[in-house]
Amino acid sequence: MGTNRKKILEYLRYDLPLWLVRTLTNWWPDVGAAIRLRGKLFSPFIGKCGGSFTVGRDVTILVPSRLTVGDNVYLAKGTWIEASGTVQLEDEVIFGPYVVVVSTKHGFSGGSARFGGVHPAPVKIGRGSWLAAHVVVAAGVTIGRGNLVGANAVVTRDTPDDVFVGGVPAKVIRPRQDNPSEVHGRRDI
């Protein structure tokens, strides 16, 4: 099968239906039932998708066929994932609003990025990690298991397991400590 034909079939199988689902569900509020249903509707158009996938409004996924999502993953409002170089979200990963994950780096040609192409590099986010609002994850990065990535951080290097990272560029601030709560949602308050 020719490369162009393969790309067209992939676009028709993943990208176009996901765009349609996103367009039809973006007006739904970000409440429990809506984010669960939106996740179920997104799931068939993700490369590999585990159970209990929940998705907020205005989530954009580019090249969804190269995205792997584990169980109990939540993508908050405004998340933007570019998965050309592959993106793997392990179980129980949580994204805050407006998180950006990019799996390619720009190439330059003749002093310009416009026609320089891209260099794909995989991104992996470890089990149980939480990326707070406005975090950016660069291509080629592995975020360890159980990480807390502080708001507005830009992660450009791999992180170890069970740490709190923050800043631009992100660096380890301290070990992350468990602190379980009896409150698991608005209904518990």
Image: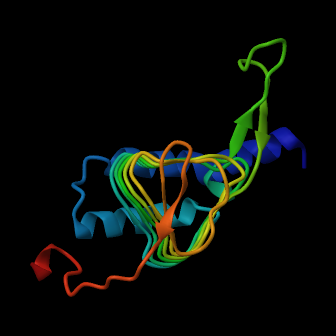
**Figure colour scheme:** rainbow
Residue at 47% of width from left, 61% of height from top? 42
Quadrant (top left/top right/bottom left/bottom right) for the C terminus = bottom left
Residue 106 position within the rendered picture, expressed as x and y whole percent measured from the top left: 73, 31
Residue 119 position within the rendered picture, expressed as x and y whole percent measured from the top left: 79, 39
- Residue 120 lies in quadrant: top right
Q: Look at the picture and state if 141 lies above or below 51.
A: above
Q: Specify the farthest residue to the top.
A: 110
Residue at 44% of width from left, 71% of height from top? 53
Residue at 21% of width from left, 63% of height from top? 31
- Residue 146 visible (yes or no): yes
Please state if 18 lies on the left or on the right of 25 as rendered.
right
- Residue 187 lies in quadrant: bottom left
Judging depth in this view, the residue of 151 and 7 nearest the camera is 151
Please state if 39 lies on the left or on the right of 7 as rendered.
left
Q: How many marks?
A: 0
Q: Look at the picture and state if 178 lies above or below 23.
A: below
